[in-house]
Amino acid sequence: MLKTHNCGELRVENVGQQVTLAGWVHRRRDMGGIIFIDVRDRDGKTQVVVDAGRSQAAFSAAEQIRPEYVVQVRGQVSRRPAGQENPDLPTGEIEVLSDELVVLNPAKTPPFLIDREEAVDEALRLKYRYLDLRRERMQRNMMIRHQAVKFIRDFLDRRGFIEVETPILFKSTPEGARDYLVPSRVHPGKFYALPQSPQQLKQLLMVAGYERYFQIARCFRDEDQRADRQPEFTQLDVEMSFVERDDVLNLVEALIVGMVKTASAVPLAYEQFPRLSYAEAMERFGTDRPDLRFGLELVDISDIAGKSAFHVFAENVAAGKPVKAIRVPGCGTYSRKQLTELEEMAKEAGAKGLAWMAIDPETEEIRGFITKFFSVEQLVAVMERLSAEPGDLLLIASDERRIVHAVLGAMREEMGQRLGYKDRKELAFAWVVDFPLFEEMLEDGHYAPSHHMFTAPKREHISWLDSDPRAVLSEQYDLICNGYEVGGGSIRIHERWLQQKIMNLIGFSMEEAREQFGHLLDAFEYGTPPHGGIAPGIDRLVMLMAGEPNIREVIAFPKSQQAADLMADAPSTVAPRQLEELSIAVKEGLGEKSKQGMTQKLR
């Protein structure tokens, strides 16, 4: 080895020892006859003192080095002089007095500073990702990810799970997002698909009798990017036989609690995760993935507002549409401009408008256009219903229930951000259960599945599939945290007749079902056990545990917002010979049209 110790390893117990360190020059400070160098490796940093009086050769070499040079240092561990200790550094009580310094490799000046945290354009960071990954924050993130995955493997191994890898090249089947397709050279005109998830394969492993399976699975989806999405991502894939819903939830909850305690930089808000029904989550928070770090809950005031003289509320309530409100503390002094901004946001979420009442913090006067349509008794009733206080702002919406939930859910998120509630450094996990089996009825008379077509309906609701499919609840469950869905799963359908019935309801003919899922339907005829599973997203979990704003910060080599690898310049064109081998022809000018379309979209 070129070093005897790592740079974060030395302590006062090592004083007097001769050691060899190797790493990168983190900082260099020239004090005349003495040069101080902080040498860094993945393990940490150690201060090296290069004194011309101790070694002129080492001093001459130190005069030439610059940040990010790779160096090797031989010397003696010494206590730092009294008063010069660095309590923020694990090695802050010692330093190494250099007898020899060797430059193993020089370095160009990096395009951004690596020795400190500062704002750097993300495109530049992604282009030089190998340098960005040297920074302390990024190395911490990668270590959190490593510790989390190691904990997962050890935890599941102790509970009788075995890890099985499933294919990356598989069949294209409809699973919600667009597939990434891979052309076959051996079978011209035919394609593999990269898996959006190992869903069918893990169910087949249950048919095969493995009972407890897991995989740290690579998955691929060709969909528009956002802060918590990447075209290729990693999920923990878990499947279990002979289980009911609570068996899966209890196992995963214990795993998450242990993983956070072991690896997270952000603590848990609580160790027992609340369980909300889908209906309760929507009614209270306007979304099925609420951020539970704060309240600002939706409150139904239909019975009060429906009796007011405001005809919009009265007519909506008469038609069965709700009137709901949220109370926002301390925002009762919002200006007309600020309120107009909120109204525009509400319209973007689907509202025709946004009503409001504001309570003056000093006079306690209630202002707002709609107040004149409410009697004093009605205003008092609204204030009591919402527990309103002087200085509060009430945001009110009325329309179809789904629109009211979308609008006030968006308002809740916005005001939670403005008031700093979403900045709280804690992880508030919860389960959402009892989802509808179907989202909506389509124009062709078929139904869109809420989760995926392999999700089992509740056994007591199966008979409703013939009479009222929209009333059927499913065995789906989602794990949420801080406003994100971090995992989704369900108890699966394990009977062929029921799977066929669900496929028919969502619009698959017998022929189409056979073509797409024949392998799974056939397997269901050979003794399939009841089973269920879940697939938490490792990238999102690590993002939350690291306290980062997006998943690109916890992936070693992520794609940009436009799904491009800026470091390797991918996707890229390929040689005509490669296309010919794959029996593929690219239309003339297609790349330029695509580029123009993207430019217009960005504008």
Image (spheres, helix red, strand yellow):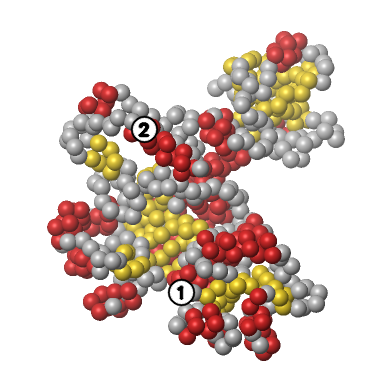
The label shown at residue 227 is none
> In terms of secondary structure, where does tag 1 sit?
loop
Q: Nearer the viewer, residue 178 or 590?
A: 590
Rendered location of residue 225, percent (x, y):
45, 46
Q: Nearer the viewer, residue 532 or 595?
A: 595
Q: Quadrant of residue 320?
A: bottom left
Horizontal side, residue 370 vs residue 599: left or right: right
User: Mark 2 or mark 1: which comes first in sequence?
Assistant: 1
Rendered location of residue 286, percent (x, y):
51, 69
* Relative to 342, residue 304 above or below: below
* Relative to 495, residue 591 above or below: above
Q: Quadrant of residue 141?
A: top right
Residue beneath the point at 77% across and 23% down: 29
Horizontal side, residue 336 vs residue 497: left or right: right
Residue situated furthest right in the rendering: 83
Distance between the alpha carbons at the discs numbered 2 and 1: 43 Å
Residue beneath the point at 69% across and 65% down: 336
Residue situated furthest left in the rendering: 511
The label shown at residue 591 is 2
Residue beneath the point at 27% across and 57% down: 203
> In terms of secondary structure, where does tag 2 sit?
helix
The label shown at residue 400 is 1
